[in-house]
Amino acid sequence: MKRSHFALLLPLAAAVALVSCASIQRSQDQGTVRQVASLINAGNAAQLASLSASPFLVDGEVVPLTADVASFWQGIVKAGFRVEGATLDRGDPVGADSFRSFADTMEVKSFFSQYVKKGARVVELATSAGARVRLLVRSQLFSWKILGFKGPF
């Protein structure tokens, strides 16, 4: 009888572990959305640039230079772009077809294969005004980097 209890406990423990991992990942995705939204709304282009990788993906275009990535964020801020009331809509690990969420082109597919490493995620946020923004992010040791931006759409 004891053996059958153990056989039931093992799958149950594995299921609990999987659920908690998913909730931890969702919490991390929500934190990313909150931080990026806060920096955009505060007009902090310098901090956004420092969190961004180079090369960087904007919609379907690869921005190769760090200075151009900084200019992108400065332009976003200067244009008055805001993501008020931003909430996490979804967060997915990067897979074989994730490049299509930015653009279904060879340039974007190549960017994903060359620069997007294991552990990267596509995070989509929704604003209170109904706009959507997609971020490509990668976790690092105790931080993360923004690899791409798409939106608003």
Image (cartoon, rainbow, N blue to C red):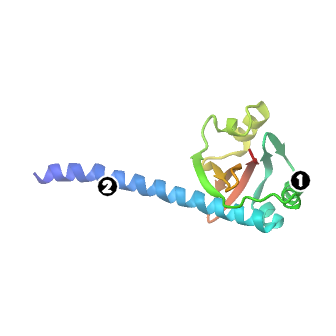
Q: Which residue is mark 2?
A: 13
Q: Residue at x 29, y 49 (%)?
A: 11
* Neighbours of disc 2 within 10 Å: few (<14), some (14-19), many (20+): few
Percent of width and height locating residue 133: 71, 50
Nearer the observer, 14 or 28: 28
Q: Quadrant of residue 29?
A: bottom right
* Neighbours of disc 1 within 10 Å: few (<14), some (14-19), many (20+): some
Nearer-N-terminus badge (2/1): 2
Nearer the observer, 86 or 145: 86
Q: Quadrant of residue 67?
A: bottom right
- Which amino acid, by three-letter code, is at mark 2? Ala
Q: Which residue is mark 1?
A: 68
Q: Residue at x 36, y 55 (%)?
A: 16
> Please, what secondary structure does the residue beneath circle 2 have?
helix
Q: Are marks 2 and 1 in contact (CB under 8 Å)?
A: no
Percent of width and height locating residue 25: 53, 56
